Amino acid sequence: MKYQVMGESTPSIPWQEKPADLRLPLWRYQNNPIIKRNPVNGVTRIFNSSVLPYQGKFIGVFRGDTYTGLPKLYLGRSDDGINWKFDEKQIQFINEKGEVEELYYSYDPRLVKIDDTYYIVWCTDFHGPTLGMASTKDFKTFNLLSVPFLPYNRNGVLFPRKINGMFKLMSRPSDTGHTPFGDIFISESPDMKYWGNHRHIMSKTNDQWWEGLKIGGGATPIETSEGWLIFYHGVTNTCNGYVYSIGGAIYDINDPSKVLYRSKKYMLTPEEEYEERGYVPNVCFPCAALHSSDGKIAVYYGAADTYVALAFTTVDIAIDYIKENS
Ligand code: BMA
């Protein structure tokens, strides 16, 4: 390996070898999508979801759009990271009074482990869409934390460790609808309750049309010898609606508000039928990236707001691509 990868690695990571004619740095799993329509009773589509290794297997927090049309969060388990079984019951969150709190809607969860605690960040309703947060140690009890930001905000992504003693959270200030704008910001907290020291990280840009409308955080950053490896989404507007592609960047290890490299070219864009056709066509929306100690990476992304799909790369291929196209 040319570069080193740090942080908790995934044993027996899902993997398929690089195709010989590789052009873009991410290659799709041949049996995509891994989660298909009507995956569990009461749920029509699972997509935009996040997974982690857990007790020698895999666990995940999944966005399930229910028969009412409202998105809710479901727990899923897998032996191999590819074949998933879901709880039929939605995840129940306990508020600070110790009561189960009914959430109006919940979508686009990101799951991260920091020290011995698992955190979920998603989009919740708090007088409008903003970030919800919860923690669990055992995937049985899920405790709601205070909402980090006032409305409107989405795409909350926590870093997998404290940096200079502070938790760090990326977010994308938004509006009440299908936000036709947006940049990525970073904030910090000593305790997961009080957030501040906000910094702007990256803007949408018309230098690259695939990310000309808005951008937003995607997978949990991966710590490498070159900096934090970031997979995010970039959106363009067409006469037939938005198109979501996957982009890549590298942030400074000690100060992740500094962008060291950012690829002008996307890493993956909707091309397959399961990405181009579905509830919302033309969406590749990354929410998780697992890595192994030998530098393999598996990216989990939502496809067409309908399926979960997998794509692969390596630490070396991803970093070289981002640097070369920065
Ligand atoms: C965004 C979010 C995502 C969704 C995307 C495309 O605003 O709502 O959940 O994948 O739109 O519909």
Image (tube, rainbow, N blue to C red):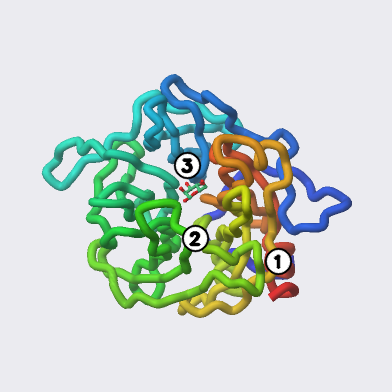
Q: Secondary structure at mark 2?
A: strand
Residue nearer the viewer, 260 or 82: 260
Q: State which quarter of the image contains the N terminus.
A: bottom right
Q: Which mark is residue 217?
A: 2
Question: Which residue is at 26% across, 56% downward?
Answer: 147
Q: Position of residue 162 (x, y in %)?
A: 39, 68
| Mark before the other along the chain sequence, 1 or 3 | 3
In the image as oriented, which residue stretches furthest toward the top?
41
Residue 99 shown left or right of residue 221 in the figure: left
Q: Is residue 12 visible?
A: no
Q: CA distance from mark 2 to mark 3?
A: 23 Å
Q: Which mark is residue 54?
A: 3
141 w.r.t. 188: above or below: above
Label 1 sits on residue? 265
Residue nearer the viewer, 306 or 143: 306
167 w.r.t. 112: above or below: below
Q: Residues within 10 Å of mark 2 (few under 14, many from 20)?
A: many
134 w.r.t. 319: above or below: above
In the image as oriented, which residue stretches furthest toward the left?
97
**Viewer-nearest of discs 1 and 3:** 1
